[in-house]
Image (tube, helix red, strand yellow):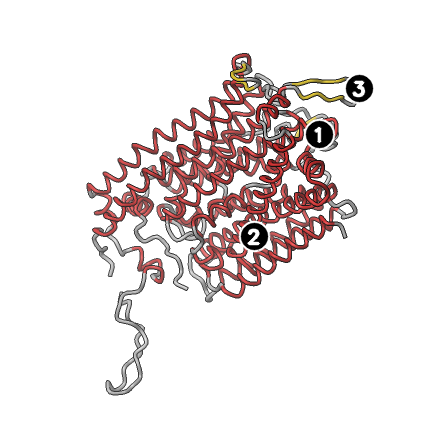
Amino acid sequence: MSSTLAMFLGFVAVTLAVTWWSARRSSGASAYFAAGRRITGWQNGLAIAGDYMSAASFLGIAGMIAFHGFDGFMYSVGWLVAYLTVLLIVAEPLRNSGKYTMADVLAYRLSPRPVRAMAALSTLTVSTFYMIAQMVGAGSLVKLLLPGTSYEVAVSVVGALMIVYVVFGGMLATTWVQIIKAVLLMSGTLFLSGLVLAHFDFSFARFFAAIGSVTWTGADGLTVTRDFLQPGAMYQPPWGAIELLSLGLALIFGTAGLPHILVRFYTVPDAPTARTSVVWAMAIIGLFYVMTTFLGFGAATILTPANIAVENMSAPLLAEHLGGELFFAFISAVAFATILAVVAGLTISASTSFAHDFYTNVIHHGRERREGEEVRVARITALVVGALAIVLAIRLQSINVAFLVGLAFAVAASANLPVIVLSLFWRRFNTGGAVGGLAAGLASSIVLIVLSPSVMGTTPAALIQHAPLFPLKNPGIVSIPLGFLGAVLGTLLTRAQPDADAAFAELSVRANTGIGAERASAH
Amino acid sequence: MNRNNDRTPIVGAETDVAPLGRDTPKPAHELTHDEDRDSVDWATVERSPAFAELLAAKRRFIVPATLFFVVYYFALPLAVGFLPELMSRRVAGVLNLAYVFALSQFVMAWTLAWLYVRAAARWDRMAAAIAAAAPRGTGD
């Protein structure tokens, strides 16, 4: 048995023990959906980081920097800055006025059923697409890290574990899986960064001098020397800058609309703790992205691109080169843990939204017919969503699904965020606006992605064999304004609600003062 | 609506059967949505000067801070995309303007978060005062 497999099994054993412990101590809806709202600030900060930092950030960005230098680093900046939107605009009002999902906030002022139905649709779209991208990534990763394991087995194991965490352990188990993953990921990254600096005798001057002139011999036999701090390797003008701008918009506005991040704020006792947890998350996520540059630049200078066969393998190969086989195994196990924590978070947010928004509030008008029904429906949904994700990930294995991550952020930024923000701050906003904004954001993101170079192309790998009709891979720059436009037009073209002033007064007072906010459970 | 109507009838005051139910109001987390909804006179709170002051204080910080970080962040891809020669200029050793600008984004984000937390501690006190003085709603 390889040491990678042993470490992976160790992680699985610990997380299953956590799930068993969570299942024993929690009962009731607020325990299942929101971990009893008793997660502390630093714990939730770690869990947000664990929920957010996917394998794409860990392996993908390190690889991008190892091959493209500065442009990869510029790409990673937005992932941290995006949390300012979460901190300044969304986290506290959401915690003060909601119960389990973002639709709770919308339902205060607006006609609950159409708004919740659209919000559930958008949440399920974002979560499922993001989950499939993660699962396909997991399958391909296993082929590289654990030779001999088939893609199908890897996807099924990841899917089965995430179902077990969510169905039996609920939000409490999911939170602790994310915390454990964040700690593992941070310690692995810290140690690897330390090894990189040690390689340069802890001299930043020597490290950066090496980054300034990376020399390697390409496959064509030509020796190349490049300054890896020079911009322009990936994003060339003029479309390059617009592409990056569009991606930045999707990150800055999308992170604050990602359902699996938003549900995390319901797990803490009050709004000040939600605020503290975002600050913790920003410290951890920022440190992580600064360290990815050490990993990426380290791989570029120590290994050189000539010795890295696959871009995503830069960090694990660097770990093997500097820390030996055992450290390679540790970093590989961290990559698995990373994927598992993210997909568990996606599964619980999808099943919460379906059970709470769609099943209870849309179909049954906000009433549980039997005690505990909502939790039972959420558990069944988690099982179905998980099984569906396994099947889809196996079906789509030969397709490059990286665009699904972009799609998830685009939908979150173009559909969810405009509606959340307008509902919190615009007195005139009404149901027509919410439905219009959600529909316009959702539809424009999907249509533009389908017409983009991610899906259309003349290469054999493209899903649709036709020259792309939309030039950008990230639709944010067009779809976000369309989402806002849909929300504004929907509002102005429909009549103001009769009780609009009273409803806005209630939401505004709740969101800004925390009066009547959901409290932590007493036991 | 009477929240304390779940007491078992006391059959004979001299028995040693303790009444179930309770005399104190329900704690906030046990209120049902309908009970909770009417617990505060929202419109009066919204019109109060203290609440207007809280909103104004928040607006004074959040609006300029948001504009600042959005402009600062998008200046990076715009500068790198449209002024590549300027951004490639080295400022210290091999470090160029683009790299220093990108790195400064991290410092900017952390600093702004710290300033926000400082300001928000003051809003917490204002909000607590408003909550303590909030008039009860019409529903009972």
Label 3 lies in what chain? A
Kindly check if marks 3 and 2 are in contact, taking CB atoms under 8 A apart as contact.
Answer: no
Tag 2: amino acid: Val
- Which marked residue is nearer to the observer: mark 3 or mark 1? 1
The chain ID associated with circle 1 is: A
Instruction: Report crowding for label 2: few under 14, some 14 to 19, many 20 or more residues within 10 A (C-alpha).
Output: many
Please, what secondary structure does the residue beneath circle 2 have?
Answer: helix
Report the mark closest to the observer, 1 or 2: 1
Q: Are marks 3 and 1 on the same chain?
A: yes
Viewer-closest of A408 and B125 = B125
Q: In 3D space, how far apart are the residues under numbered discs 3 and 1 (Cα atoms)?
A: 17 Å
- First along the sequence among labels 3 and 1: 3
A488 and A315: which is toward the camera? A315
Q: Which residue lies under the disc numbered 2?
A: A177
Residue A445 seen in the figure = yes
Distance from Cα at disc 3 to Cα at disc 2: 47 Å
